[in-house]
């Protein structure tokens, strides 16, 4: 399915060298820095990573999935990461052994991603762009940080790339098996981040472009939907048995929506608390249920009424900046400091954005081959507009952006080389 049989041997050797480099270097980094990558306090859990570790231990020892509720069952998070982490703990121990094993597993995923990046880049653009994208990714520090941190981003990025690969194959050859696999990957991604659940909606655009018969569209939709539902059923049953209510994903959806209204971590505009005296500045951004959604709607209502341009920016360009212009690099390591990485990230983003424009304008008559990349990037960007958005959530998409930037770099380099070759040829002709 992901064969490289048509790739020349020197290219394969370079690619496999990069894969080995990423696997070895990322493993060395996570082993050397170890718990330096922890974002919270393991003794007094105060961040997502240490809370995930706590949840995994409780799940393994008591069979209870809890998060932010001590030992009481909760549906605050999806169970994907605690399940994975508890599996490693069951085999390698609940202390350092299991955590280190999970980090090394993430290193393997990072190495696998290099292969997937090459495959996507070659199928979408060309071998040159694919190799440049792999090289950039191999030297992108946030990828190594992501290997060491106990979060879902590395696994989710791998699933995202696999989804893009399957989308490309579905466009090329179709077939029921591919759409079942897409349902499996979507469900796996949803167990980590539920907003991935609507990704298959991008196929509507693809199918319309391909002019598929509506019966075929319905068949593929049912295959994806039934597969997804079957795989999510254990989670729904668990929630029904535990809480006696149907919980589709989590009951904490109000929290990211409410936090999404918070512009640069500041309080709502001046005058908000006079207009809504029922809210307290000390607790306005607390909560995760329907009350949190009501708070968020009130903030938006007031903000768009009194400071419309500020809130319009925050929910459009502001989201793009928060997702992609700040590197996912909370723990810097030698030799790249955080200030240096900040500059690198901004430069990369301008190149990547120029690459999107370059690819679309140059391939406007062959836009179909760009659709899987463009639609995946668009979906996983737009889906964050109503919610809190920051670098951690934008990190998985950076690979897609890097592919566009690499296409631009490769094209410009090829043009320079061609011009240099033509000048040399003309000079040689004149000399003769």
Image (spheres, rainbow, N blue to C red):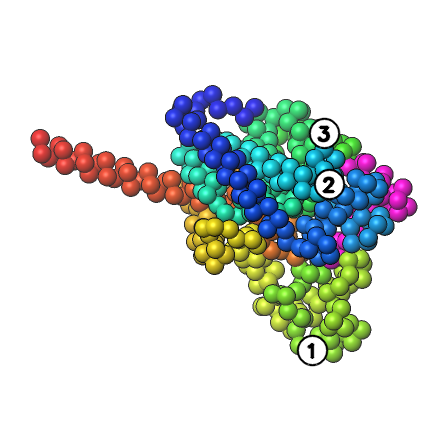
Question: Which quadrant of the figure contains the N terminus?
Answer: top right
Callout 1 crowding tier (Cα within 10 Å): few <14, some 14–19, many ≥20: few
Q: Which residue is mark 3?
A: 223
**Front disc: 2 or 1:** 2
Residue 271: mark:
1
Inspect this view and state whether residue 56 appears. Answer: yes
Real-space Cα separation, disc 2 to disc 3, in angstroms: 39 Å
Task: Indicate the secondary structure of the residue bearing disc 3.
Answer: helix
State left or right for residue 122 relative to residue 150: left
Q: Residue at x 78, y 50 (%)?
A: 67
State left or right for residue 250 relative to residue 385: right
For marks 2 and 3 on the same chain, the one whose residue lies earlier in the sequence:
2
Q: Residue at x 79, y 39 (%)?
A: 60
Measured as percent of width and height from the top left, residue 294 is found at: 78, 63
Q: Residue furthest top?
A: 5
Q: Which residues are magenta?
A: 232-256
Measured as percent of width and height from the top left, residue 131 is found at: 43, 35
């Amino acid at each position: 399915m992901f064969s490289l049989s048509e790739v020349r041997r020197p290219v394969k050797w370079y690619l496999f060298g990069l894969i080995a480099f990423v696997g070895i270097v990322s493993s060395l980094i996570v082993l050397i820095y170890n718990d330096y990558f922890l974002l919270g306090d393991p003794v007094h859990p105060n961040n997502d990573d240490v809370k995930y570790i706590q949840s995994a231990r409780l799940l393994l020892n008591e069979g209870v999935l809890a998060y932010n509720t001590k030992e009481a069952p909760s549906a605050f998070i999806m169970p994907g990461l605690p399940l994975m982490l508890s599996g490693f703990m069951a085999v390698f121990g609940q202390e350092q052994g299991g955590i280190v094993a999970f980090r090394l597993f993430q290193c393997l995923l990072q190495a696998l991603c290099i292969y997937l990046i090459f495959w996507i880049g070659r199928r979408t653009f060309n071998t040159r762009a694919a190799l440049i994208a792999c090289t950039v990714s191999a030297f992108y520090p946030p990828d190594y940080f992501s290997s060491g941190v106990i979060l879902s981003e590395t696994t989710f990025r791998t699933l995202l790339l696999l989804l893009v690969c399957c989308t490309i194959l579905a466009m090329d050859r179709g077939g029921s098996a591919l759409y079942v696999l897409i349902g499996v990957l979507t469900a796996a991604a949803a167990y980590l981040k539920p907003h991935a659940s609507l990704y298959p909606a991008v196929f509507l655009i693809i199918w319309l472009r391909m002019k598929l018969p509506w019966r075929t569209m319905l068949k593929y939709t049912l295959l994806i939907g039934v597969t997804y539902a079957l795989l999510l059923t254990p989670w729904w049953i668990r929630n029904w048995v535990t809480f006696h209510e149907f919980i589709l994903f989590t009951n904490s959806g109000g929290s990211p929506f409410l936090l999404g209204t918070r512009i640069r971590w500041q309080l709502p505009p001046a005058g908000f608390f006079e207009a809504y005296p029922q809210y307290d500045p000390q607790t306005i951004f607390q909560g995760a249920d329907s009350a949190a959604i009501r708070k968020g709607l009130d903030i938006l209502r007031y903000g768009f009424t009194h400071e419309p341009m500020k809130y319009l920016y925050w929910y459009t360009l502001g989201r793009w900046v928060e997702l992609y212009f700040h590197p996912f690099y909370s723990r810097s390591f030698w030799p790249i400091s955080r200030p240096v990485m900040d500059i690198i990230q901004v430069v990369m983003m301008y190149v990547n954005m120029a690459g999107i424009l370059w690819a679309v304008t140059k391939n406007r008559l062959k836009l179909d081959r760009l659709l899987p990349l463009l639609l995946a990037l668009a979906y996983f960007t737009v889906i964050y507009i109503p919610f809190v958005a920051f670098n951690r959530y934008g990190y998985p998409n950076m690979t897609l952006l890097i592919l566009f930037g690499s296409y631009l770099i490769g094209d410009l380099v090829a043009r320079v080389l061609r011009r240099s070759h033509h000048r040399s040829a003309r000079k040689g002709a004149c000399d003769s």
